[in-house]
Amino acid sequence: MASVTYKDVWKRFGEVVALENINIEIDDKEFLVLVGPSGCGKTTALRCLAGLEDITEGQVKIDDQVVNDVAPKDRDIAMVFQSYALYPHMSVYDNMAFGLKLRKVPKEEIRKRVNDAAEILGIEGLLNRKPRELSGGQRQRVAVGRAIVREPKVFLFDEPLSNLDAKLRVQTRAQISKLHQRLQTTFIYVTHDQTEAMTMATRIAVLNKGILQQLDTPQQLYDYPENLFVAGFIGSPAMNFFNGKMVKEGDDLFVDLGSFKVKVPKNRHETYQHLVDQEIIFGIRPEDIHNPEYAPPSIIAEPVDVKVDVTELMGNEIFLYLMHGDHSFVARVDPRTRVEMGDEIRVSFNMDNMHIFDPNADPDNPVAVR
């Protein structure tokens, strides 16, 4: 068990900057998820910690020890890769025991560790099988078991579920979360799937283009994204964004979106007063756009007339792809809603949960205004 620290870490591949001044402190026993789109630097950050990549500048620490120059085998970490990387000619038992045999661990200790790991993962009945006789999910559990038997200070997972089908991904996700609770060890997990990140993490580090965008708990990231990138990346379907302008009419503030306007709640006036007559970006999540008939009674609702472009019935909810003027956006509404393509309906925006981003603060990645 150990804490992990990235301090002012840079990683360059020639002229390409893969990691730019990364600072992250990961607590002992924490489950931290590194998330972001392909090429954002999350796997590079993991490989720098594992010692599979040399960092260009900065320090990586495990507990209080700087491990920049420590060999990977001496860092006391275990890594689970996207590919299972099992030896096809060995049994499951031998695959899990292989690393311990290389370290000259006594046979009885090896047997105990392998059997304990197999019990934790529910693969006791598979120990005599070869990898070709296993399903994808079983192979992934064997790969995790091979890491468990090492009893490392830190577990590293590099997109371990990406080769599994959707149903198995959900099951294995739950198993890894339970595993973390049982082992009480530091887990660092890389994924591009924000749903995995939201459901598993103690905290999430969102990266984009090698830069740490935000580091916080899943709920804080969802409720209070610091910039447009985080707002658009966290949440499924993604947050809707509208280019608009903050305007004042009498004592009221409105977000003027061209073809329609929405009134800003009174309790937000002080926050947004300085943006009057400025271009802004208005954000609202699909789950905050309601069918008025089934909207929560306590919200500050702004009505918007729209045309239904596409409907997607999901069983427990309906996704409505809506249009108003030049704007296209998504609503996630109550399954009792009865609409069809081409219908003209009224929806309610929950203005309690509106977001405003200021493109003047950073044109490339507008900052949230609070």
Image (cartoon, grey):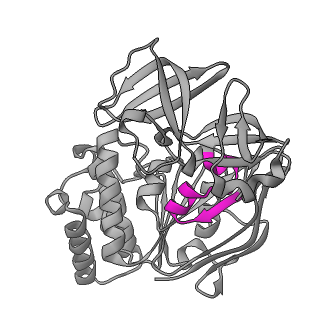
Q: Quadrant of residue 108?
A: bottom left
233 lies left or right of 28 = right
Query: Most extreme residue toward the bottom, as rendered?
Result: 64
Residue nearest the viewer, comparing 127 with 369: 369
Residue 360 position in % (x across, y down): 86, 47
Name the foreground residue: 71 vs 314.
314
Image location (x, y in percent) of residue 212:
69, 60
Q: Which residues are magenta?
A: 212-231
Q: Residue furthest top?
A: 342
- Quick one: which residue is furthest to the left in this view? 125
Q: Looking at the figure, which quarter contains the C terminus?
A: bottom right
Q: Measured from the top left, where is residue 3 in percent x and y?
A: 55, 81
Residue 14 visible, this angle: no
- In this view, 113 is above or below 32: below
Going by the picture, which residue comes out furthest to the front? 250
Indicate whether residue 71 is drawn in magenta.
no
